[in-house]
């Protein structure tokens, strides 16, 4: 389902940033879609850490084949060696296993998140082993569908801004934040379209 704010965000972004508006017009029917399951979203984000989108997709597909019902209980029922065979590093196996344990044991309180601010959700999530700020930001965008997240450490966003705004030159965090001022309060949407400028096929988390 399309986020209720999506069309308004597109209009505002196109008006405030012509370069971004051109990217948006190249993808008239695409929009953010949430997978809707918190555990799966977080597990998929962990899988995607520090590897390319293509590699992450391949690993996730193998993991999904090994754990057809992607629930904490089902993942914990698989031998770690089988998870490693899907292409996960030993550390990522530890991270997704710890995540599954926390969900199974009720240490994560999903029901509270909708009422919490972005920074409050990030603070709770980074307390989980293997989840840093980037992973928490991906969760805010792809699961909670928060509209104004700016993942400045995301390599795809950095590259897209470099190509679209800096003629391929490196871009600093300060420059990203400065450029992104024009995108508020829709920085998640702007980020999503800048990702599309690099890869027209939306990544799923």
Image (spheres, grey):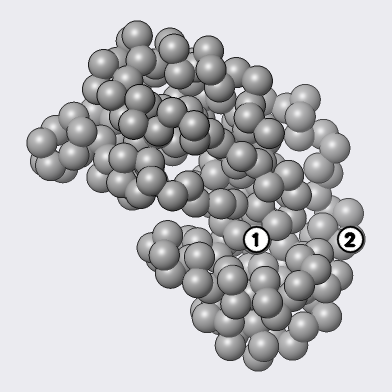
Give coordinates of residue 114: x percent, y percent.
Answer: 76, 29
Which secondary structure lies at badge 1?
helix
Q: Residue 177: name its quadrant.
A: top left
Q: Residue at x 20, y 33 (%)?
A: 164
Q: Which residue is mark 1?
A: 43
- As drawn, the residue found furthest toward the front would be 29
Q: Residue at x 74, y 88 (%)?
A: 79
Viewer-proximal residue among 127 and 10: 10
Left or right: 149 in relation to 98: left
Q: On screen, 38 above or below 53?
A: above
Q: Residues within 10 Å of mark 1 (few under 14, many from 20)?
A: many
Q: Residue at x 80, y 68 (%)?
A: 69
Viewer-proximal residue among 59 and 79: 59
Q: Residues within 10 Å of mark 2 (few under 14, many from 20)?
A: few
Q: On screen, 192 above or below 49?
A: above
Quadrant of the drawing holding the N terminus: top right
Q: What label sits on residue 86 in the rendered view?
A: none
Q: CA distance from mark 1 to mark 2?
A: 16 Å
Which secondary structure lies at badge 2?
helix
Instruction: Choose the circle earlier in sequence order: 1 or 2.
Output: 1
Q: Which residue is mark 2?
A: 105
Q: Residue at x 57, y 56 (%)?
A: 45
């Amino acid at each position: 389902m399309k986020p209720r704010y999506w069309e308004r965000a597109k209009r505002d972004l196109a008006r405030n940033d012509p370069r971004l508006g051109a990217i948006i017009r190249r993808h008239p029917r695409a929009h953010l879609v949430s997978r809707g399951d918190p555990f799966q979203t977080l597990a998929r984000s962990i899988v995607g850490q520090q590897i390319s989108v293509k590699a992450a997709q391949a690993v996730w597909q193998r993991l999904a084949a090994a754990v057809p019902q992607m629930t904490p209980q089902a993942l914990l029922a698989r031998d770690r060696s089988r998870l490693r065979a899907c292409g996960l590093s030993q550390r990522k196996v530890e991270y997704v296993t710890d995540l599954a344990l926390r969900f199974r044991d009720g240490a994560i309180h999903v029901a509270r998140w909708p009422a919490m601010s972005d920074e409050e959700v990030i603070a709770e999530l980074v307390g989980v082993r293997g989840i840093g700020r980037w992973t928490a930001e991906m969760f805010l965008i792809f699961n909670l569908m928060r509209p104004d997240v700016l993942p400045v450490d995301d390599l795809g966003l950095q590259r897209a801004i470099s190509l679209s705004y800096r003629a391929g030159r490196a871009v600093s965090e300060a420059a990203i934040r400065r450029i992104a001022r024009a995108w508020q309060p829709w920085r998640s949407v702007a980020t999503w379209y800048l990702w599309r400028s690099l890869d027209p096929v939306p990544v799923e988390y």
